[in-house]
Image (cartoon, rainbow, N blue to C red):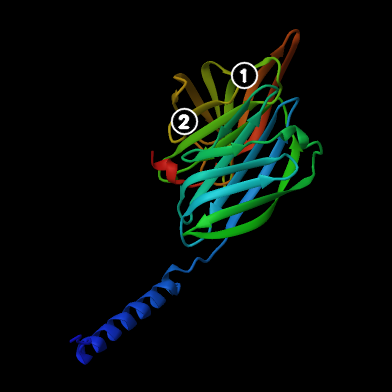
Amino acid sequence: MARGIPAYALGGLIILVGFIASLSLILSIPSPLTTVTGYLNLTANAYLGFGSNLLVVMGVNNFNFPITELSIYIPRTGTNITISGEIPSGSYFILMIYQGLNNTVIIAPGLSVTGYPGNLANLTRSGFAYGLNATAVVYGVVKKGVFQLTTQDSGVIYAVPLITNLSRPILRVYIFQMAPMGSTNITGFNLISLGQVVGEVKCNVSEPIPVLPSGPTYFAMNISSINGTLRPLGVWYYCNATPTTSLPSLLYLSMAMRYVYTYNTIVIRREDWFPVYIAPMQMSNT
């Protein structure tokens, strides 16, 4: 004779199923502790050279959780790239896309980049604002924003000086030649602080630093030292400060490049100034 499930067992089973259903419902409701808040701050500038162009995108993660993926799309150029790697909350990031006549170089310190860089030559108007779409993945949540890409004319070179860790006075410098022909030699550089006390430091290098259209020249220097070695170039630099006897503070810091550009019989000697970006990044710990 078949026997049914005892009443006490059936009641326990109903309670167990009800508990599991309640637990699933609780887990499906977003916790206030994991709600994504904040925003993405992003600025984009394109520097139009003499046949070469440079896009610099600087941003900061103002969300309360890390950004694990960031996609950037520029309709005008067709640029459609994805930046992968964790960008912690409160941390900066920078993306540089340099295009010459026959080459493209993409730089994103501490991050990886995939996708199509587009054609920066389509940015034909200087002093103009184009649209830029950004999509960030934050704690599994997709956040979208629309930003502006502004353009301006560039000189023979363009430099991007960065300080990525305020506790380590290391200045990282990327120098791009914005002409597809000829070559540039850096003969020295200046640092100037326009804070409460104006101070300027003039530095010479022991040998010229070449900059070619094939890609950027990179070096790092300790700005708390009067002289030292430019890494990874191994070139010595010597500084003297005027009117103060020490290097300037980090407040309103700018950097000048003194250089000689040569193409056949054309020789141009110039000094161009560039702002120093203060951008604390995760990669600065490496």
Question: Residue at horizontal 80%, vertical 38%?
Answer: 126
Question: Which numbered disc flags the more N-terminal residue, 2 or 1?
Answer: 1
**Mark 1 crowd level (few <14, some 14–19, many ≥20, 10 Å Cα):** some
User: Could you tell me the amino acid type at mark 1?
Assistant: Leu
64 sits left or right of 82 in the view: left
Q: Residues within 10 Å of mark 2 (few under 14, many from 20)?
A: some
Residue 199 in view: no
Mark in the foreground, 2 or 1: 1
Q: Nearer the viewer, residue 126 or 18?
A: 18
Between 4 and 270, the one lying in front of the other is 4
Numbered-mark total: 2
User: Does 178 appear above or below 280?
Assistant: above
> Mark 1 highlights which residue?
212
Q: Is residue 107 above or below residue 233?
A: below
> Is label 1 in a helix, a strand or a loop?
loop
Identify which amino acid the numbered label 2 is placed on.
Answer: Met
The residue sitting at 69% across, 14% down in the picture is 182
Give the position of the N terminus as an image quadrant.
bottom left
Give the residue furthest to the front. 1
Question: Residue sitting at 66 percent across and 17 percent down?
Answer: 260
Q: In the rendered image, which residue does mark 2 sit on?
A: 221
